[in-house]
């Protein structure tokens, strides 16, 4: 004996979507309706997917928090360095300013090249510190 027959009344929009989805190869209207009703009657079956999604969202939230903490730490470190440098550096005498500015520009250009090289190699200060932590531990 076959399956019981059920007559349904659907909105035009749902009917059109059911027709479109069932027009694919190997998919029937019956399979689509049975799957939908099965999920409706057994919401616990969806929990596996929801739990996986929630775990991924929690992990993303933790990583985002770590990124925010690291960014705040970097910003505070830079701010403290600049503050210290500005309060401890003597003013340059008037006659030496041009030479000092030229030297400063060369040092800055070298600094920027070093940063670009480290970022390109992804072997920056943080990676070196992690390596030294492992060696010390």
Image (tube, rainbow, N blue to C red):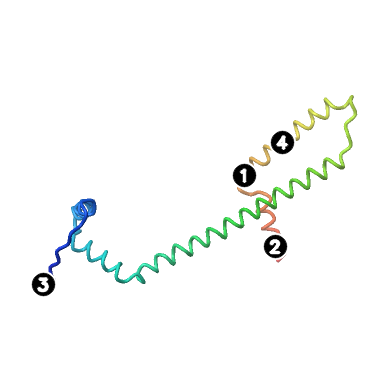
Which quadrant of the figure contains the N terminus? bottom left
Q: Which mark is first along the chain, 2 or 1? A: 1
Query: Which residue was labeled with disc 3?
Result: 2
Seen at 65% across and 50% down, the residue is 71
Q: Residue extending furthest left?
A: 1
Query: Which residue was labeled with disc 4?
Result: 110
**Spot occupied by residue 25 in the image (x, y as percentages of width and height):** 19, 55
Q: Nearer the viewer, mark 1 or mark 2?
A: 1
For label 2, count other residues whose C-alpha is less than 10 Å away and answer few (under 14), some (14-19) or many (20+): few
Q: Nearer the viewer, mark 1 or mark 3?
A: 3
**Spot occupied by residue 77 in the image (x, y as percentages of width and height):** 74, 49
Alpha carbon distance from label 4 to label 3: 80 Å
Which disc number belongs to residue 35?
Answer: none
Alpha carbon distance from label 2 to label 3: 71 Å
Alpha carbon distance from label 2 to label 4: 29 Å
Which disc number belongs to residue 135?
Answer: 2
Q: Nearer the viewer, mark 4 or mark 3?
A: 3
Q: Nearer the viewer, residue 35 or 130?
A: 35
Q: Secondary structure at mark 2?
A: helix
**Residue 90's image quarter?**
top right
Which disc number belongs to residue 119?
Answer: 1
In this rendering, would 116 be left or right of 91? left
Q: Is residue 43 above or below residue 118?
A: below
For label 4, count other residues whose C-alpha is less than 10 Å away and answer few (under 14), some (14-19) or many (20+): few
Q: Which mark is first along the chain, 3 or 2? A: 3
Seen at 75% across and 31% down, the residue is 105
For label 3, count other residues whose C-alpha is less than 10 Å away and answer few (under 14), some (14-19) or many (20+): few
CB contact under 8 Å: marks 2 and 3: no
Q: Secondary structure at mark 4?
A: helix
Q: Which mark is first along the chain, 3 or 1? A: 3
Alpha carbon distance from label 1 to label 3: 67 Å
């Amino acid at each position: 004996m076959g399956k019981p027959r059920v007559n349904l009344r659907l909105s035009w929009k749902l009917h059109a979507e059911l027709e479109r989805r069932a027009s694919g190869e190997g998919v029937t209207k019956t399979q689509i309706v049975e799957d939908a009703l099965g999920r409706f009657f057994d919401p616990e079956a969806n929990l596996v997917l929801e739990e996986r999604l929630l775990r991924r969202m929690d992990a993303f939230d933790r990583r985002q928090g770590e990124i925010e903490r690291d960014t705040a730490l970097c910003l505070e470190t830079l701010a403290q360095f600049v503050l210290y440098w500005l309060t401890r550096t003597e003013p340059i005498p008037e006659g030496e300013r041009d030479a000092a500015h030229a030297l400063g520009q060369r040092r800055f250009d070298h600094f920027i090249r070093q940063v670009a090289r480290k970022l390109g190699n992804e072997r920056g200060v943080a990676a070196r510190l992690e390596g030294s932590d492992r060696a010390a531990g």
